[in-house]
Amino acid sequence: MRVNILMSTYNGETFLAEQIESIRRQTFTDWRLLIRDDGSTDKTRSIIKAYTQKDERICFINEDETENYGVIQSFYHLVKYEEADYYFFSDQDDVWLEDKLETQLAAFAEVDNSQPVMVYMDLMIVDAKLNVLHKSMVRTQSHHANTKLHQEMTENTVTGGVSGINHSLAKLWMRTDKVIMHDWYLALLAAALGQLIYIDKPGELYRQHDNNVLGARTWNKRIKNWLKPQALVAKYWYLITSSQEQASLLRDFELDADDRALVDAFIGITEAPLHERLLSLKSYKLAKNRWFHTFIFRTLIITKFGYRRN
């Protein structure tokens, strides 16, 4: 069994060594860590090189190349770099709990891996010094974890650093345009064409700090959003239209009739007549994971308030 851990780095010198050490402490030890640096200008690259000398399981795949691809393209390159049975995504600034890989691999062992499968876990949100802020990111941010296509199409509950995919799913990732984030797109493929499996247990300490590219929704972020209602409506519409574009990528695959109808309804809902919008929201249970966000989502779809056609 070949297990590849995939890490894309960018100016991560502050926490990178701590994350790599957490991977080296995994109870499952037969893995290969592939690291691609996305154009760092700090000491990240020298840290990676030092670890390749310390541990033969660690490989710096672009030691002689410094091009910046962006996070989605960088992870796409890592997935396609070499074939494995299972691929696990890793951020550069978190800390994996010691049984993370063992737990997820046990879940993969219980399913048919000839079909596309993603297994993901919960996270504990911590501050820069690893003090626990929230014991469950899923319950704090989204109320529940998604495992069905209609849930994941409108809101992502998968965090890359606690997700893993099998080779059957990795083979299906053939494009990066219209992809909002690699973890979300791969979760959609799994939900539509195979299985999206959630383990209700934390797999890592998800660190929140000043340099996060993405991160947990905090009260500070929420207050800033609500102080600018026009910008907030525009942001909601961006998320809706972007998720419609991402869902359109599913049309590249052979879906069953019900899933194709669901995808088509979601993609076309903003241009449909009012009665069809109402029917689609009800029939396909299109919603968010919290009632308040569902209220805003459905209100915007019904009224089209602030909607600007691309």
Image (cartoon, rainbow, N blue to C red):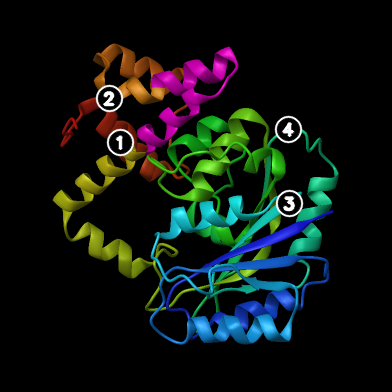
Q: Position of residue 136 (x, y in %)?
A: 59, 62
Gap between marks 4 and 2, in whole Å? 33 Å
Q: CA distance from mark 3 to mark 1?
A: 34 Å
How packed mark 2 is, by other alpha carbons closer than 10 Å (few <14, some 14-19, many 20 or more), is many
Q: Nearer the viewer, mark 4 or mark 3?
A: 3
| Residue 303 position by quadrant | top left
User: Which sits in the foreground, 18 or 175?
Assistant: 175
Mark 4 / mark 1, whichever is N-terminal: 4
Q: Residue at x 63, y 39 (%)?
A: 171
Q: Earlier in the sequence, mark 2 or mark 1?
A: 1
The answer to whether the residues at label 4 and label 1 have Cβ atoms under 8 Å apart is: no
Check disc 2 and report the residue beneath it: 270
Label drawn at residue 164 = none
241 is higher (above) or lower (below) than 200: above
Image quarter of residue 224: bottom left
The first of marks 4 and 3 along the sequence is 3
Boundaries of the magenta span = 243-265
Name the amino acid type tagged 2.
Answer: Thr
Identity, as a three-letter code, of the amino acid under mark 4: Gln
